[in-house]
Image (cartoon, rainbow, N blue to C red):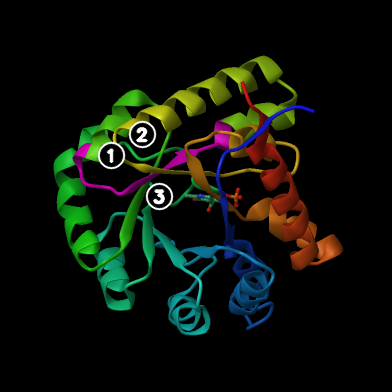
Amino acid sequence: MSITDFLGPLRLGVNIDHVATVRNARGGGVPDPVRAAVLAQSAGADGITAHLREDRRHIRDDDIERLMAALHIPLNFEMAATDEMQAIALRHKPHAVCIVPERREERTTEGGLEVSKDQNRLSDFVGPLAEAGARVSLFVAAVPEQIEASARVGAAVVELHTGAYCDHHDAGDFKARDAELARIAEAAAQAHALGLEVHAGHGLSYGSVAPVAALREVVELNIGHFLMGEAIFRGLPDAMAEMRRRMDAARVTEAA
Ligand code: PXP
């Protein structure tokens, strides 16, 4: 019998942005992202993530208000580092704030924050949010200087961008995928050593989740687009249960 090692719990944050994308395609009230959030909550999500973009292309201001009222699990409020968003976050006081780069013309959050080039501004930006009680997370690429800078500006958490890793996985370029995974693993260890909590997300699917879930320092994954796509075919609770099963299985390893 082999000895197994449990790496510790891994939280699943469910991103409900793309329920709002479908709603907004018709401009009405359905499907309601808050209903999806409440369903995810009852199906065992550890948190809900919603990104209020500057252009309001999916989540809208009143969704944030309704999410705050409806949820008893933590809301992770994703936003750009703008004065408008800071004021909204300070008004609602969500459990967590994840600061992401935002470019109007991008289809999704394409890169990580350039923390190292913007340290003074980000320190000033993070301070009031942290003082208001939010756990502030910075969405960064797995690059050593970005991790160091994240610790310097006072973030509690870094969320490592898994988009490039997932793109290589989906394209079948396993050499590039494994190189990116190695960078993510190193960044996770570096961030943990600096006292930062480590999250990861973007583009994760059933096929790509296990190696990221198996990183000891990672304590939360935020997953949206793939889960909502699966939910169309099998329902959200079932889609989440399969993701959870794969995450949990990856946390149990053979001890060295
Ligand atoms: N984490 C962050 C910071 C994101 O910006 C996103 C996408 O909004 C996600 C996780 C989830 O990515 P996906 O929808 O591709 O699962």
> In whole angstroms, how far apart are the C-alphas of marks 1 and 3?
18 Å
> In whole angstroms, how far apart are the C-alphas of marks 1 and 2?
9 Å
In the image, 253 versus 130, the foreground residue is 253
> From where the camera sits, is residue 175 visible?
yes
Does residue 121 sit above or below 130 in this rendering?
Answer: above
In the image, 186 versus 19, the foreground residue is 186
Task: Read off the magenta span.
Answer: 152-164
The image quarter containing residue 12 is: bottom right
Return the residue at label 1. 150
> From where the camera sits, is residue 110 visible?
no
User: Residue at the spot x=36%, y=28% of the render?
Assistant: 190
Contact? badges 1 and 2 (CB < 8 Å): yes
- Packing grade of label 2 (10 A; few <14, some 14-19, many >=20) is many
- Packing grade of label 3 (10 A; few <14, some 14-19, many >=20) is many
Looking at the picture, how far across and down is residue 157, in whole percent? 36, 47
Looking at the picture, how far across and down is residue 127, in whole percent? 17, 56
In the image, 234 versus 79, the foreground residue is 234
Return the residue at label 2. 191
User: Residue at the spot x=60%, y=70% of the render?
Assistant: 20
Residue 102: assigned label:
3
The image quarter containing residue 86 is: bottom left
Does residue 23 sit above or below 81 in this rendering?
Answer: below
Mark 2 or mark 3: whose residue is earlier in sequence: 3
